[in-house]
Image: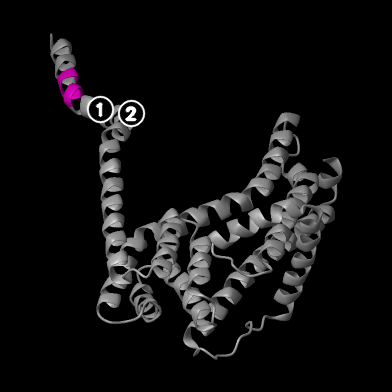
Amino acid sequence: MDLAAANPTVVLIAGLMVLAALGAAAVAVTVELRAGAKVRARLSEAPAAGARGKAPASGLAAGVMGGLTRIGGRIAIQDPSQVSVTRQKLIHAGFPSREAVAVYLGVRFAALIAAAVLSLTVAPWFLHGAPPVMSAVTCGGLTLIALLGPEHYLGMRRGKRQQEYRDGFPDMLDLLVAAVEAGLSLDAGVTRVTEELERRYPNLAENMIFLTLELRAGRSRKEAWASFADRLGIDEARVMATMLRQAEEMGTSLGETLRIFSDDMRAKRMLRAEEKAMALPAKLIVPLILFIFPCLLGVLILPAVYRVSQTMHGH
């Protein structure tokens, strides 16, 4: 602590190191998101035989991405059992690229390095003269944020996307039923429905674009829908993939099958809404007791207390 306080150069160098580590992680994530979005946009606008390729990145971003990818690849080799689990989480969170696992592990490593640098240099300088317990708590908090921060962000992003999938799935089914009953094939109906859902449910439409591209590339309908269900990670998509596979194998009408499944989805959606409505009174008890009732009591009782006090002072 004394060295950091006595020599500002040490603090400046340490701060630059921390900024470099945090900047590397931020740039890596930003580049990954933008590159993936550009590629998906180009694939969705291109024809069936359109070109494939990644959007070019700048030299600094490419260097940072390359370094994090190499570090993450080495970490993945050390623990291959968790690679498939991490890859599935990243796919559900909207990172389907092959390098996503390596980039994610590299970002976690960079966050740990940044936390270590902050704990050893900058944090002691800011906490100079503070009790040792405060320094220990600060260092532990930084380490905990570095360990759990990326995982927490991934979980939040995954939950948000899956909630969008669940909200948009009944609408997708209704539109798909209308398209199939209007005379379109299932594959053409998926393409048409994707255009309708793109504004309201962009993430669901993005996965449907991948489904369309897989079907155009010659992948079987059964495999393409199974892959679609794996990317979404919700039970509704898995049930639909199984239902379409069974309908194709048994030769039943797709329109009737989709309509029955759509009605079932609507019923489940209504049941979820009713369940939330039934749970609302129990959830309102705590806010009522802590915030609303005290205000009401204050509004009702304080004027009477004021009048009584004025009367007593008058006498």
| Label 1 with label 2: CB-CB less than 8 Å | yes
* Residue 271 counted in the magenta span: no
Label 1: which residue? 293
Find the distance from the CA under tag 1 to the CA under tag 2: 7 Å
Q: Quadrant of residue 66?
A: bottom right
The residue nearer to you, when weighing 238 against 300, is 238
Q: Which residue is mark 2?
A: 290
Residue 3 screen position, x and y as percent = 86, 45
Q: Name the spot of residue 231 as percent of width and height, x first.
A: 52, 63
Residue 10 horizontal side relative to residue 128, left or right:
right
* 281 up-or-down from 96: above or below: above
Give the total of numbered labels.
2
Q: Position of residue 216 (x, y in %)?
A: 50, 83
Dominant secondary structure of the residues highlighted in magenta in the image = helix
Amino acid type of the residue tagged 2 in the rendering: Leu
Q: How is the image coloured?
A: one colour
Q: Residues within 10 Å of mark 2 (few under 14, many from 20)?
A: few
What is the secondary structure assignment of the residue under circle 2? Answer: helix
Residue range (magenta)? 300-305
Where in the figure is residue 188, as x and y percent of width and height? Answer: 38, 81
Q: Which mark is residue 233?
A: none
Q: Is residue 154 left or right of residue 192?
A: right
